Amino acid sequence: MNKMMRRYVPFMKAGIQTLITYRLNFLGFVIGGLIYCFVMFYLWRSVFESNGGGMFLGFSMTDMVIFLFLSNTTGQLIFSSVGEQIGEEIRDGSITMRLLKPVNTDLSYLFAELGEVLMKVIVLLIPMVLGLEIYRFCVTGTLVFNPVNFLWYLLSAALAYLISFRVNLCFGFIAFYVKNLWGIGILKNSVIGFLSGSLIPLAFMPEGLRVCLEYLPFASMNYTPVMLYMGKYAAWEILFRIGLQIVWALLLFGLSKLIWFGAIKKLCIQGG
């Protein structure tokens, strides 16, 4: 274990340094997400006002605010650019240097992103949770924060990141075949954004579609952690959702390995 950590910790440090170096890019990403949340806030406020200002499909307006901002924060926390990175390295030929290193390719990408995730937890997640709980206290007049739900959220978010990483890793391996992922990447992000429930809560979907989407891995990437934080699941359902995330993480791990063994035989460097 110590030998592995010595080998991969430098990748984590590099991830932290990358986020610090390009902090304006990260700041722009965060501000863009906040602007989107405020736009959606006014949209959903109109929906709730037209509904009489009460509950709407099991959500209050306060719940909706928590969902919008925490969903956006969770999306940024679990965001993985490994697919685009693999595509770029194949395009310019630099992936050959990574393949020649005495390290596991998957873990080298993973630890580099874990450095970024750690920074996001500190500078993004913690302030957002504090802000949301202050907002909820001002609206309800009582402290609603549940530390147990927050711990479930952290566990679920960690599993969500692993699922997101493996999904994007599988996507990145497509570059071994198609060489350019730009157009496909736009489609992939749009589809995941909808299917994960980050744009519209899955609870608002028709019953049959909702049940189907909740069993797909995309719901485990965003919707499940947010619902756990908001306390929307019963005790038995919490264990079921966490178990479902573990199953998808293992299945996607196996799928990524399977695709890798086939993709590496198709390696064709365009640049370099």
Image: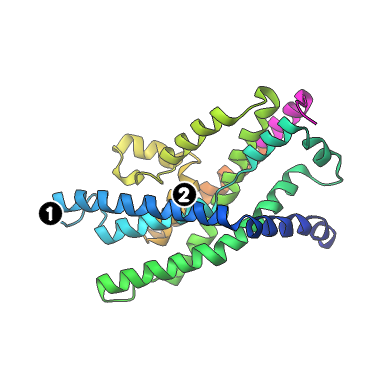
Residue 222 is labelled as: 2
Q: Residue 166: image x %, image y %?
A: 62, 42
129 left or right, relative to 100: left
In the image, residue 134 above or below residue 190? below
Which residue of the protein is positioned furthest toward the front in this rendering? 24
Horizontal and vertical percent for residue 164? 57, 45
Residue lying at the far bottom in this picture: please name it: 142
Residue 200 percent coordinates (x, y)? 34, 44
Q: Amino acid at mark 2?
A: Asn
Q: Which residues are magenta?
A: 256-272
Q: For the point 49% across and 31% down, which residue is it?
A: 187
Q: Is residue 101 left or right of residue 18?
A: right
Q: Is residue 34 magenta?
A: no
Tag 1: amino acid: Gly
Is most of the magenta stretch helix, strand or loop?
Answer: helix
Q: Residue at x 82, y 60 (%)?
A: 6
263 drawn magenta:
yes
Please identify the quadrant where the C terminus is shown: top right
User: Which of the marked residues, 2 or 1, is nearer the chain's N terminus?
Assistant: 1
Residue bearing mark 1: 52
Please tell me the numbered disc located at residue 74: none
| CA neighbours of label 2 inside 10 A, class few (<14), some (14 to 19), many (20+) | many
Q: How many marks?
A: 2
Which of the 4 image quadrants contains residue 258? top right
The quadrant where residue 270 appears: top right
Distance, label 2 to label 1, CA atoms, is: 29 Å
Q: In the figure, 161 relative to 122: above or below? A: above
Front one among 183 and 265: 183
The residue positioned 69% from the left and 37% from the top of the image is 86
